[in-house]
Image: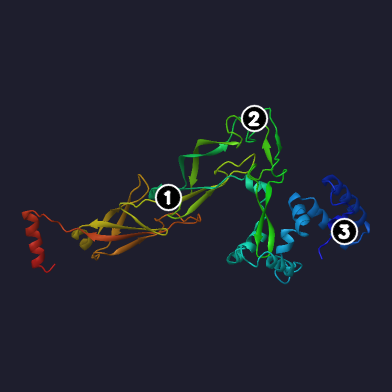
Amino acid sequence: MAEDYYKILGVEKSASPEEIKKAYRRLAHQHHPDKGGDDKKFHKISEAYEILSDKEKRQQYDQFGSTFDNMAGGQSGFGGFSNFDFNSFWEQAQQQGGTAGFGFENLGDIFDEFFGGRRTKKQDLKRGDDIQIDMEIDLEDTLSSVKKEFNLYKNEVCGRCGGTGAEPGSKLKECQTCRGVGQVQEMKRTIFGTITHYTICPACQGEGSIPEKACNVCKGDGRIKKEETIEAVIPGGVDSGQVLKFKGKGEAGRRGGAPGDLYVRIFVRRHKVFDRKGDDLFAEIPAQFSQIALGDEIPVPVLEKGKKMFLKIPVGTEPGKVFRISGKGIPRFSGYGRGDLYVKIRVNTPKKLTRKQKELLNKLKEEGI
C-alpha cells in the first residue's frame, strides 16, 4: 500500500503549500538524527515533503496514490504496477463492451502514455532550440585556428519586454487554463479503463503564466526574429564531417530560458593540388627525365602562403617514386603535431621537340639510355 504522505506530515489533503512547509520544518527539527531523532522517521518525513511540496508530483500523488518516478522505478511485477488492480480495470473494460473502442493494437502506446506523459521541467521547456548549419572552408583554413563570420536569422530576446512577453508596466499572471501548473489533463479510454494523460498547456505553452498585456513588439512570445552576425573560431586540423558546438549561439529561450546551441558541420573543399587523407597530404610533382636520371632539387608545393620548399631527388629516381616529408601535413585536431606530406614524382614527356633535342635523344638512344 502507498504511503499516506499527508498523514506523515500531519496535514489535511487540502493543506496549502505554506502549511505543508511549516509542518515539515517542525517535524524535521523534531526528528532530525543529529538531535537524537529516528533516522527512518526522518527519511519518511523528507520523502513526504519532497512529493507534497512539488506541484506536479503532488498532483500525480493525489491522482494515482504515487508519482510517475516511483511507479516507473525498480518495482516488482509489472514494473511499477505491483499495487495496480488489473482485475478491476479488466472488469470495467468488459462492462463497457469488451475491448471494442479501446484500441487493443495500441497497447504499447497505453504504457508509453501512462509512464511517458510526464511533463518536462519548465526550465527545459523555456530553453531555446538548437541550430545546425553547414559550412564550407578551404584546405588552407585547416592549418591553424581561423575566424569565420556569418549571419543567422534566428529568435533573439525581445528588446522591448526583455523576454518576459509582457508590455512594459504590465505583469505576468497565472494561467487560468492550467492554474499555473503548465500542464493540463486529458482523459483517454484504454483497454484498462480511463487513464489521465498530461500534456503541455496550450494557453501558456507550459509556462504556467501569461502576460496581462502582451508586448506590442513580440506579441507575448518574448522573442523576435532578428539577423545576428556570428563569429566562430574554427580550430586547426578540422576535417569534413566534423560537427563543432558553439554553446549559447542557438535560438533564444522563452521568458529568461537558456538559449540553445549552434552546431556547425564542416565541409573542406577539394584542393586542386593536394588530396587529404586524415592528417596526411598527397601530391604529385612534375620532373624532367634529366632531373630524375642525374638527380636534382625540385620545388614542392606547400599550403602555407609565401613559403617555399624543395625536395632533393637522388640520381636514378624511378618515375612514380613517392617521397615522405615528415611533419608537413595537416595539424592534428588534438593539438599535438602534424601529419606528413607524400610527394609522388611524375615524369613529364615533352610533346614537341626541337631538332637539337631530337638529335640529343637519338644519341642517348644509341648509347642505350
The numbered mark, 1 or 3, whose residue comes first in the sequence reads 3
According to the picture, the residue beneath numbered tag 1 turns out to be 143
At mark 2, the secondary structure is loop
Q: Quadrant of residue 187?
A: bottom right
Label 1, label 2: how many angstroms apart (C-alpha)? Answer: 50 Å
Crowd class of label 3 (few under 14; some 14 to 19; many from 20; radius 10 Å): some
Residue 286 on image: x %, y %: 24, 56
Element marked by disc 1? helix
Amino acid found under the numbered disc labelled 2: Glu
Which dot marks residue 343? none
Question: What label sits on residue 42 in the rendered view?
Answer: 3
Q: Quadrant of the N terminus?
A: bottom right
Q: How many neighbours does mark 2 have within 10 angstroms: few (below 14), some (14-19), or many (20 or more)? A: many
Identity of the residue drawn at 94% across and 59% down: 36
- Give the answer, above or below, for where 316 lies relative to 334: below
Of 111 and 35, nearer the camera is 111
Percent coordinates x, y for residue 317 in the rendering: 25, 64
Give 216 or 159, whichever is nearer the viewer. Answer: 216
Residue 320 vertical position relative to residue 130 in the rendered view, above or below: below
Res 35 → quadrant: bottom right
- Amino acid type for the residue under numbered disc 1: Leu
Residue under the image location 13 percent in, 56 percent down: 351
55 left or right, relative to 37: left
Name the amino acid type tagged 3: Phe
Location of the C terminus by quadrant is bottom left
Image x and y of residue 54, in percent:
77, 50
Whether residue 190 appears in this view of the structure is: yes
**Residue 167 disc label:** 2
